[in-house]
Image (cartoon, grey):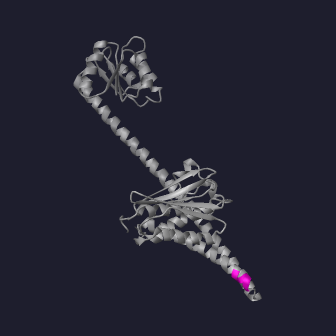
Amino acid sequence: MILIVDDTPENLTSLKKVLERHNFEVDTASSGEEALKKVLKTAYVLIILDVQMPGMDGFEVAEAIAGYSKARETAIIFLSAANTELSFITKGYSSGGLDYITKPVDINILLLKVKTFYRIYEQSRKLIEVQKTLLEEIEFRKRAERKKDEFISIASHELKTPLTSVKGYVQLLERSVDKGDIPTVKKHLKKAQLQLDKLNNLIADLLDISKIESGKLKFNKKYFNLNTLLDGIVEVIHQSNPEFTITKTGHVPVDIFADEMRIEQVIVNFLTNAIKYAPGTTEVHIKVTVENERVTVAVRDFGIGIQPEQQKNVFDKFYRVEETSIHFQGLGIGLYISAEIIERHGGTVGVNSTLGEGSEFYFNIPLISTTETA
């Protein structure tokens, strides 16, 4: 928008009409004081400012505008009929003006200057936008680098922990074997196997995320019975967590077409998280519903819950809720991998949670997934 400042009404009217005919948005002020009030409220691209005005003259107005941080970069063109001496023009530039036009105004020259200033403004605005985008991208590289460093540190720790445990159990096994203590040997072997299983799962997650990054995560879709799959998962999870009662409700009346192994991976991730983040509780609920040719599987725990502002991030790569990362181990990639698997099935994932009352993680996929498998 252009602001014309002149104490002569005829000058305001004529200039306003000319500029509006050329599709410029124009505002007017009949005094320096009025102009300053408008500058405080409105951002102008250009101010056409008469020098000779009662009260505040154009130079004083320009100097005052230069003191406003919001308007400091606004271009000012001075108009004057009284004096064209070099010293007078110099004063205009030193007051903050970028150009000087003498009266009577040559409309063609004024229009040329106005168009030039607008072009400069547009270019400056685009440069500022580019600069802002670049700064945001740089900050995103920095954040990604920090996330990567944090992940490497966490991964090293998580992989080292089961390896150290296995090493300890092997040493205990050697002593028990020497003593011929078979019950103790079996106990240590079982514990070592649990640590090896944990290590295997960590490595599998790392391999999966590598495949996702390279676009090489493969799917083998076929028809299978989701009810049977769920029953098998519940049985296995219950065996390793006998203190938990896992209740399943709902039924899928037909076989679904999807990657059975990958869907199992997602459900196991949801269930193990439900148990992991619900210490002191003994219940997990699984609910299965079918509607509009889509099946939804929801896993509900009664554990610590998640803050509302953190819920939108739980499926992000490497994200770990700060409060829980201190107390619970993990790489922060299980939910990310689950989300990728479900998305590749044409589905969605989500979470409903209340802090201190528990969380419900769910996914929804079509009964027949026909999305790309490679």
Give the main secondary structure of the magenta stretch.
helix
Q: Nearer the viewer, residue 14 or 109?
A: 14
Q: Nearer the viewer, residue 335 or 183?
A: 183
Name of the residue lying farthest toward the top: 54
Q: Nearer the viewer, residue 15 or 312?
A: 312
Answer above or below: position of 278 versus 234. above
The answer to if 184 sits in the magenta stretch is yes
Q: Nearer the viewer, residue 274 or 317?
A: 274
The answer to if 258 sits in the magenta stretch is no
Asked whether residue 333 appears in the rendered view, the answer is no
Q: Position of residue 82 (x, y in %)?
A: 32, 14
Answer above or below: position of 70 versus 212. above
Q: Position of residue 35 (x, y in %)?
A: 40, 19
Q: Position of residue 321 (x, y in %)?
A: 59, 55
**In the image, what residue occupies the spot 59% across and 52% down?**
306
**In the image, what residue occupies the spot 47% across and 30% down?**
69
Q: Position of residue 22 (x, y in %)?
A: 24, 28
**In the image, what residue occupies the spot 67% across and 60% down?**
279
Which residues make up the magenta segment? 182-186
Name of the residue lying farthest toward the right: 179
Asked whether residue 116 appears in the rendered view, the answer is yes
Is residue 132 left or right of 78 when viewed as pictured? right
Number of dots carrying numbers: 0
Q: Quadrant of the C terminus?
A: bottom left
Q: Quadrant of the N terminus?
A: top left
Is residue 70 left or right of 166 when viewed as pictured? left
Q: Quadrant of residue 178?
A: bottom right
